[in-house]
Structures are given as C-alpha cells and as structure tokens.
Amino acid sequence: MAKTKTEKTDDKHLLEKLAKLTAALEENAARERALLDEMRDLLAGRRGIGEALKSLYAAWGELWQARYGTTYVFSFPKDATLMKRLVVALGEEEVQRRMAVYMTKQDEFYVRAQHSFAIFHGTVNQHGPQSLAPVRPAGRGPGHGLAPVSDAADEAIQQQIETRRRREEMRQQDMSDADIEAVFDREYEERVQRRSLLPDPRD
C-alpha cells in the first residue's frame, strides 16, 4: 500500500531528526574522547590541552602585538573552540609555527582583516610548509623582492621559543603572571621607543 503525502512528510521529519541526533551524539563522543586523551596526558605527566591553549593564546598575542602594536582581543568561547580544533588536528608546535607564518603574510585579504584569528583558522592549510617559498613582486628580479617568508617565520618562531623559555624561568622564580607580563610590556615599550629614535631612511 502506497504511503500518503502526510506519511511521507512524517518520515522525512523523522529522518531529519535522527540525523540531528546522530550528529549531536558524534559531537559528544568526540568531546569525551578529547577529555580521555587529556586525562591520559596528565596521568603520563604530559601537558594537557588547557596548558597548550594558554601557551598558544600568549604566542598569538605576542605575534599580533608585534605586528599591530596593540593587544589582541579574542572572541570567547568561539575562538576557544577553533583553537582546540587546531591543537587536536595539528599539535601545539605546528599551530604555533603556522601562526608565525600567517602573521608575515602581506596579502590584502589578511591585512584588511588585520590578521584575525577567525581568518587564520579558516585558512590554516595555506600557512603550512608549502607556503614558505620566497615571495617577490611581479616584474622584479632577485634582490628587489620581499624577504623570504621562511626567514621571517623562522625568526618569529625563534622569538616565541625564547619568550617561552624566559616565561618558564620567571615562573620558576615564583613570579606571578601579572609581573611576567609587566616585564614583557616594559621591554616592548623600550623597543618602540628605540625605534622612534632611529633616523627616518626617507630623510
């Protein structure tokens, strides 16, 4: 016996509801797996994802401040969810490496968005190892192009490693996070002041 139009509509609604419930269960299962993985890491003496996120927020803030001269304001909890996805997919070190590459990009799209974190998440595959080739403006030969992105990225990464090392040393000296940030703020202000005293090459 053929189904009526009403019965077909009911079946369609049921399938849509089941699809949503399945997606919700899969999402919850993924969260549970992430929690179990973090618990295993902590039991094994490894850093949990919470510590990785804190480190990456700090690294992003330093990179963004170095480029734009001000503090980056994250959009929580949305950005936290995006950051967790990146850490799970790529690992902390690779995420930090791609952050450094992203901040060197001069594309108008990134500059107009002021290198936002949401754009970074959406374009993260464009900042992997294959993006580290030298970039030169069209029509110009060697010696007139932009500095290779790989050099700039490596320098930024080395700065991040050194900053992290110094943070750990300060924490071991029982300095509070506020005192540590005050130290880096003073150093940043000193760098800005030194740059302002340099002669303008256009003069």
Image (cartoon, helix red, strand yellow):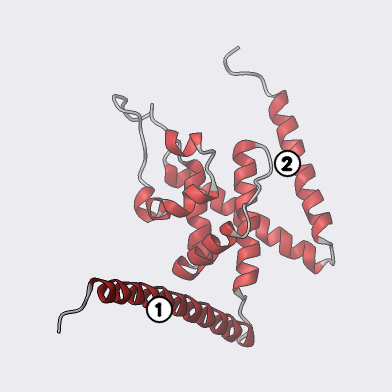
Which residue in the protein does label 1 denote?
Answer: 22
Estimate the x, y position of residue 120 in percent, counting from the top left.
48, 50
Q: Distance between the residues labelled 1 and 2?
A: 50 Å
Q: Nearer the viewer, residue 17 or 85?
A: 17
Furthest residue toward top:
203
Estimate the x, y position of residue 126 in percent, counting from the top left.
38, 51
Furthest residue toward left:
1
Quadrant (top left, top right, bottom left, bottom right) of the N terminus: bottom left
Estimate the x, y position of residue 183 in percent, counting from the top left.
80, 50
Quarter of the image holding residue 46?
A: bottom right
Identity of the amino acid at label 2?
Tyr
Which residue is painted at 51% across and 50% down in the image?
118
Which residue in the protein does label 2 denote?
Answer: 188
Horizontal arrangement in the rendering, residue 4 relative to residue 70 (left or right): left
Horizontal arrangement in the rendering, residue 168 relative to residue 13 (left or right): right
Which residue is painted at 84% across and 62% down in the image?
175
Element marked by disc 2: helix
Identity of the amino acid at label 1?
Thr
Horizontal arrangement in the rendering, residue 55 relative to residue 3 (left or right): right
Q: Nearer the viewer, residue 12 or 119?
A: 12
Q: In this view, does 141 lie above or below 147?
A: above
Quadrant (top left, top right, bottom left, bottom right) of the C terminus: top right
Estimate the x, y position of residue 200 in percent, counting from the top left.
63, 18
Can residue 4 be seen here? The reply is yes
Quarter of the image holding residue 168?
A: bottom right
